[in-house]
Image (cartoon, rainbow, N blue to C red):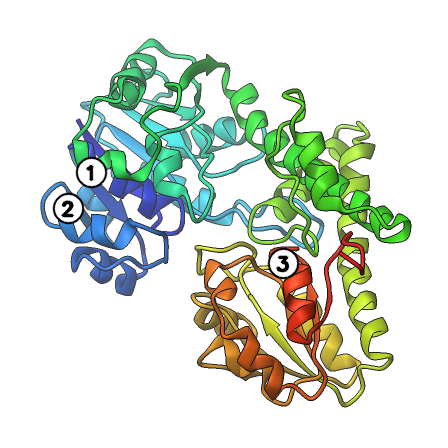
Amino acid sequence: MKIACIGSGYVGTVTGAAFAALGYDTLIIDLDGRKVDQINEGISPIYEPGLQSLLAEICGKTLRASTSYQDLEGVSLIFICVGTPSKEDGSADLSWIKRAAEDIARVLDSRQHTTIVLKSTVPVGTADFFSLLVEKESGLQRGTQFSVVSNPEFLREGFALGDFLFPDRIVVGVEDDRSRQRLRRLFQPILDRNYPEKLFMYGDADKPKPVYFETDIKSSEMIKYVSNAFLAVKVSYINEVARLCDKLGANVKDVAYGMGLDTRIGPKFLQVSAGWSGSCFPKDTMELLATSGRYGTRMDIVRAAVQSNEEMHSYCLEKLQAMLLSLNGKRIGILGLTFKPDTDDARATQASFFIRNLLEMGAHVSVYDPKGMPMFRALNKELPIAYCERGEDTAVRSDALLLLTHWEEFLMLPWQEMVCTMRTPHLLDTRNCLPAARFRAMGYRYQGVGIPLES
């Protein structure tokens, strides 16, 4: 079975590499020649734990990359893994989806049936839109010569290979028997855990085997959006709890732990932060709201979660301002530019909000992130900030440190030495990942979010 992935981003590269590691003849197509060259040289165009070593092993064997859609000849499964960023009104921009449909249509082979799989996060109804475009451009008939199905991705950046090989569920929206059988056969090794021993390093072999769930295409498209929106609601909720804990003197870490012991709630996504951000939750919640608005349906809980998230950004900024009384002329060191650890993805992160507001308030900003600085710098060239080579450099002559991302590396910094290099040793830990008592004993004026000052 020959497979192709259109797009070499965080979804396409992982999907292509994982299928190739399972032994499938896999092609990644991207119009960016630099990324294609990197993949063919065994170099990952993104940072994802384990991906670099996997690519180095399989490139030139079961995996190759190309800029030409002509190379789709003989491919029976084409996975669409292109980006769907937000437009100004919050709805999904389907420009790359449209282009992929047109480019694929020009090379589809009328002599074989091809299954086109939408793995990108797309609004309900996109499969129909995609099919009509392909029919128009190719002259081929949907269902007879090609089919479009839905198979949303549920990959967490930082755990993407493990999520692909050891998923909770595989959701497939399919309405024709040929594609149904083809996809079931494709995913069977994952359902059975029947793959090379070396791949077990990416996940928990004792984890229950995944559920394979077949549904109609529109329901499959919907599942991805409402799943992400639900998780965003959960994060917004615990952040609101943290703000109340700040007022009451309760410890949100203990509160969240006690909540999570209830199996109906569970412990995941109950970690306090400065608010959710990144390339998924913001755009997916906004698209869901845009869709509900188009159909005259209210989603007040999701809308409230978005508003609460914006308030959490402001709350943490005000907390930092209260620590220093004034931010004008102050030097602030920021630890963490990515929306989560173990990724280089610095798109639409909370760091951008804080940096821009701090600069407007007259502060001087220095930043450090183990993996995210190249992307953040490329996306924010206009920001007059200092990029540090080491985490400890953000402390030098600073008035406060602001920790935004829970990188393990940050736990290992020479904190005792750093406190001596600061002008005033204020530390705001928005992730509550540093031990408060220990840091106060070092001399830091430590504050978390929802953590009592005396803890």
Residue that badge 3 annotates: 435
Numbered mark located on residue 20 in the image: 1
Q: Secondary structure at mark 1?
A: helix
Quick check: can you spot residue 384? no
Residue that badge 2 annotates: 58
| Circles 2 and 1: CB atoms closer than 8 Å | yes
Q: Amino acid at mark 3?
A: Pro
Residue 368: image location, x then y, percent: 52, 74
Residue 351: image location, x then y, percent: 63, 66
Residue drawn where x is 64% and y is 73% of the image: 442
- First in sequence: mark 2 or mark 1? 1
Instruction: Give the mark toward the camera: 1 or 3.
Output: 3
Q: Nearer the viewer, residue 197 or 46?
A: 197
Question: In the displayed structure, does residue 24 sit left or right of residue 313?
Answer: left
How many numbered marks does the figure carry?
3
Instruction: Give the mark toward the camera: 2 or 3.
Output: 3
